[in-house]
Image: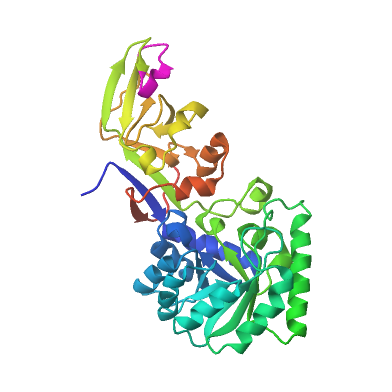
Amino acid sequence: MSRWAWAEVSAAAIEHNVRVVAQAAAPAQVWAVVKADGYGHGAVLAARAAVAGGAQGLCVALVQEGVALREAGIELPILVLSEQPEASLEAAVRHRLAVAVYSDEQISALTAYGASNHPVHLKIDTGMRRVGAAEHQAVGLADTIAASPAVQLEGVFTHLAVADEPENPFTDHQLDRFDVVLASLAAAGHHPQLVHAANSAGALAHPRSRYDMVRAGIAIYGISPGAGVDHLCTDLRPALSLHARVSHVKRLAAGEGISYGLRHTFERDTTVATLPLGYADGVPRRLHAVGGTVLVHGHRRLIVGVVTMDQMMVDCGDDHVLPGDEAVLIGSQGGHTITAAEWADALDTIAYEIVCGVSARVERRTVEPRPLD
């Protein structure tokens, strides 16, 4: 059974985008970030496509995400990017998931759950102020790791806060601090195999951030990390499009209102098409209020009335529209394109949130890239 609402995901586009990032970042390795179900694209699909494109490792946010990849038969190295609840560490050890550490407690917990020479990546907070060890703690934690038979120091990393703003000096400030930490670790005899700092924006815009590997997330899905690096993303191909079929058509008279609150009133007689997806599927409820449009018959149609949980309405004017006609919410039709970034700009958010927000009840269909109509 399938709905009249679905997302199309191009594995070929993801594979292409990984190659683009790899070319920019060479000779650094590319590790593909497939957390949050591959940023809404499907984690297993994204991981396999990334491997085909040359990724040498994968990154996830949760142990459960890494386990799902292992159960799908993916054997590439996988790094869990933050410390995890103690109860999940046994699974991390059993499924050979490298884990981030930045506290003595996490190292001790790995020991308690049967780790032996298990790879860990020491995370240093150089200014993001989210998670990570303080710079002055780095050598002490590395000493603890070296002294424990449970773990081995495979990597050291940090995370960049403003890499998508190439002119912002804070990225260089972070990297300067990170280099001091790396020098202190080396002086203490610690030489990790993998040093990494770059996210997608860092990989594209900051050569000194590439070190041994880059963690490529949003870019491998064909989306720019931010306006400041748009010019470096012209070769990327969006991998996800969002579609629906018209489920109902009605003719409404001038002066009538529509949807909850009757917030939209028609100035003329018009044809309204209902699409069977809404905010429970990832279409923001207030998209109507910021001029959001949908493509039907190759033309932009204004979203009218608040988007409801399962349905939304679009104004089709006097055009002849029938139930079953295809609508494109994100993607291309008739020479027009609506992007996740367009939604994000209108809603004052980022494209990451848009694609991650496409819910699990929207079927993902693997497709080859569609030619522009």
| Residue 308 place in picture, x, y as percent | 36, 32
Side (left or right) of 341 relative to 208: left
| Residue 226 among magenta residues | no
Residue 150 vs residue 39, the one in the foreground = 150
Quadrant housing residue 256: top left
Task: Give the residue at x 75% y 65%.
Answer: 175
Side (left or right) of 88 relative to 237: left
Quadrant housing residue 128: bottom right
Task: Give the residue at x 49% y 39%.
Answer: 337
Side (left or right) of 286 relative to 170: left
Q: Quadrant of the C terminus?
A: top left
| Residue 223 place in picture, x, y as percent | 55, 51
Residue 281 vs residue 249, the one in the foreground = 281
Residue 212 vs residue 372, the one in the foreground = 212
Residue 370 sits above or below residue 128 on the image: above
Q: Is residue 54 visible?
A: no
| Residue 73 place in picture, x, y as percent | 36, 75
Magenta residues?
A: 258-269
State how the image is colored.
Answer: rainbow
Taking the view exactly as shown, the residue that stands out farthest to the left is 1
Task: Give the residue at x 78% y 72%.
Answer: 180
Q: Is residue 30 visible?
A: yes
| Residue 179 place in picture, x, y as percent | 76, 71
Numbered disc total: 0
| Residue 261 among magenta residues | yes
Task: Give the residue at x 40% y 44%.
Answer: 242
